[in-house]
Image (cartoon, rainbow, N blue to C red):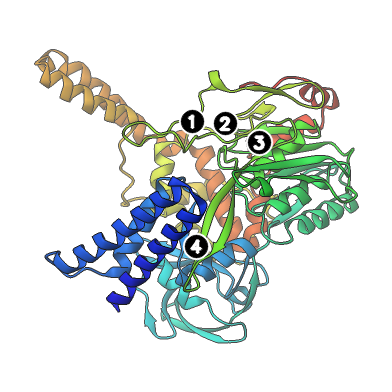
Amino acid sequence: MLKKTFAGLLVAGTAWGLFSFTDGSERYFDIAKNLDIFATLFKEVNTYYVDDVAPSKLVRTGIDAMLKSLDPYTNYIPEDDIEDFRTMTTGQYGGIGALVGKRDGRTIISLPHEGSPAQKAGLIIGDEILKIDGVDLSAKADGDVSRLLKGQAGTVVKLEIKRFGVDKPMVVEVVRANIQINNVPYYGMVTPEIGYLQLSGFTVDAGQEVRRAVASLKEQGAKKVILDLRDNPGGLLNEAVNISNLFLPRGKDIVSTKSKVADWNKMYKALDEPLDVQMPLVVLTSTNSASAAEIVSGALQDYDRAVLVGERTFGKGLVQMTRPLSYNSQLKVTTAKYYIPSGRCIQAIDYAHRDADGSLHKTPDSLRVAFKTANGRVVYDGGGISPDLEVKEQPVPDIIRKLLSKNYIFDYATRFRAANASIPPAKEFRLSDAEYQKFVSYLNGKDISYSTDVEKALDNMIAKAKEDKHYEEVKTDIEQIRKKVATNKSNDLIRFKAEISELLEQEIVSRYYLQKGLVEATFNDDKNIMAAVEVLNNPTRYKTLLTTSVKR
């Protein structure tokens, strides 16, 4: 078998060599030479290395390292991972329709999708899955659990479930179905005149989903719309074009791609009649809005069609396509860069030029090149899409990081659901002072210790002072600061009551109203949504933002 492998590699090298002679290019000779070196090196390692080597694992390591030196988006997809890749691009898979993951070593259902087989079978957030078809999950990783849950539509999977408040585990049979992950998990009215829709991905039919959502919002009375692209990682390029086309006139340039292969250079235009080119529109962006999400937000900004609110986007201006390989594997390879209507490329990192140690850098603001929108506003390339109105995310307090990492908020919401059959609608539910005090009591005896940034700085200061032999001189002052910090930490549950209550409300609401409720629970607390509503309710400010140049 190894002989065949080596022969195949050598034949491949020879083929490249033959091609090099007919092509007359030193480049192809270089490829053939290095393939030959790789094959002979592999053979020598396999023959003489002190321990046995696994051929597939060794070659996979070489492939991954090679592609990693290019950019993070050029990947090898072996046959075993093709199904997961197909799910990412189509949003479809056969399974139970629930988000499942590890929490403190337990396999927990964190969110059944509405109308899914999981919800229909009675599974709820917080349920612990002990076994799948008799397979114990205690030592299984998330990937193993996912594979056990997925399967052909119509097949039955038996889950052994442990539920809070129920003495004994129970067996639940779930009939798998073809699950379609919605690109628009939520749309609804924030105010009587302002509609809101959340776009979480760009898989097949994303454009149609957005069209239906906006049309429905207009039927409900929406005269203005908020399009939420925060944390949207992108997806299919053509769906980004379709969504931009909903708000831009037919014939407008949306995005162009420029590749090393000239035949692949292409301009993508709005080909259909738009849904609405006049309705005031705000697009929410974050540092995790990337790729297709940046095409939409960038195109709408370049035509001054929408006000962007939030944070500067990620800066991924690279296009990938898949190429078939042998043995049913595939290569996802970066083939081009894309440019939005103003002519700017929003790629933030130049992967072709690295420091001597291999490190990469984002384009500094001083080197970003200016371009102009349709109204003549100045915008910049080289580092994502900058918002018209910046709303920075506030740093997460240390106490909240601890509560989340230890799953105390998640687990308390599970307890709350077991004790309360119903709550008011998601938009109306508020955690009472008495209920918050119950949460504080629930934390008694639990580990909520953490080190603040100030304490870490003090530790560094002590180490430096001891090194310089000045510690005894400053010891008293340092200890006084440490005591003050400790006192402040003990009051953090009171100091950050508002922030903790918001998270508790959202987690509790999700237990009753799932993902839709989770979104609606943020309407009164989300600073980005509140800023968007304020802009949309102030026509003068809206117009001013669409005529004001964007900050670097």
- Label 4, on which residue? 414
Crowd band around label 1 with a 10 angstrom C-alpha radius: few (<14), some (14–19), many (20+) = few
Return the x and y of residue 313 as percentages of the image width and height. 60, 36
Contact flag, marks 1 and 3 (Cβ < 8 Å): no
Mark closer to the chain start, 3 or 2 = 2
Return the x and y of residue 341 as percentages of the image width and height. 75, 35
Cα separation between marks 2 and 4: 42 Å
Q: Amino acid at mark 3?
A: Asn
> Which mark is nearer the camera, 3 or 2?
2
Mark closer to the chain start, 2 or 1 = 1
- Label 1, on which residue? 362
Number of numbered discs visible in the structure rendering = 4
Disc number placed over residue 383 in the picture, else none: 2
- Residue 189 shows in the view: no
- At x 55%, y 87%, the residue is 156
Cα separation between marks 1 and 3: 26 Å
- Label 3, on which residue? 528
Nearer to us in this view, 158 or 74: 74
367 lies above or below 125: above
- At x 76%, y 37%, the residue is 300
- Which SS class for mark 2? loop
Nearer to us in this view, 114 or 272: 272
- At x 41%, y 72%, the residue is 144
Crowd band around label 3 with a 10 angstrom C-alpha radius: few (<14), some (14–19), many (20+) = many
Q: Is 171 situated left or right of 301 in this image?
A: left
> Which mark is nearer the camera, 1 or 4?
1
Q: Amino acid at mark 2?
A: Gly
Nearer to us in this view, 335 or 506: 335
Cα separation between marks 3 and 2: 21 Å
123 lies above or below 214: below
